[in-house]
Image (spheres, helix red, strand yellow):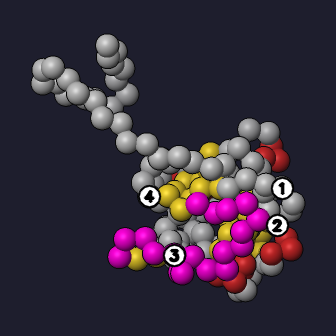
Amino acid sequence: MADQDIYLIKKSSGVNNCPDGKLCLFTNVGYNKEVGDILVISPGIQVDQAQLESYGFILGAGGGVSSVVNNMSQAATLVSGIYLDGQTLAVSAGQDVSTLYDYPLGSSTWNDAVRSVVSAPVTEVNLLILAESDFSVGIDERYLFK
């Protein structure tokens, strides 16, 4: 990632502060009606929770994504899991979302629930693997299936 592919605008508000061709995440509803931070992301980038927080955009209870502006020519995807896993919410090209409280996520809402972001459309797939014998799968282990 180039240095300006992702950057934080501290203590700012308003849809007009999201540059053309970028995806912007706002910490407060109403595009930071109460002044907050804006994370600006270029197209074609995926970032997990640790990467988002490394730019100073802290996620979790009482903090995170509450509004979104997609000024890109492609859809973007918000993700509930910290490692680009979990439920997804598409944000269409050119779409502005004033409050993520309006979007249900299980028994709650998407407000402050975003943990990963892909500034591109994402297609979810289910992968079924069948094995002839019992085996266990370990994290960070490689397997060859024929």
Q: Say which residue label 2 marks.
A: 18
> Real-space Cα distance between discs 4 and 2?
25 Å
Q: Earlier in the sequence, mark 4 or mark 3?
A: 4
**What's the distance in space between the residues labelled 3 and 1, CA to CA?**
24 Å
Q: Identify the residue under disc 3.
A: 103
Amino acid identity at mark 2: Cys
Q: Residue at x 72, y 68 (%)?
A: 95
Looking at the rendered structure, the kind of residue marked 4 is Gln
Q: Locate residue 146 relative to residue 24 in the image: left or right.
A: left
Q: Secondary structure at mark 2?
A: loop
Query: In this picture, is 56 found above or below 141?
Result: below
Label 4: how many residues lie within 10 Å, few (<14), some (14-19) or many (20+)? Answer: some
For disc 4, the marked residue is 87
Quarter of the image where one finds residue 87:
bottom left
Of labels 3 and 1, earlier in sequence is 1
Which residue is situated farthest in the bottom direction here? Answer: 34
- The x, y position of residue 112, in whole percent, is 52, 71
The alpha-carbon separation of the residues under discs 4 and 3 comes to 12 Å
Sequence-earlier tag: 4 or 1: 1
Q: Nearer the viewer, mark 3 or mark 2?
A: 3
At horizontal 87% and vertical 60% (from top left) the residue drawn is 20
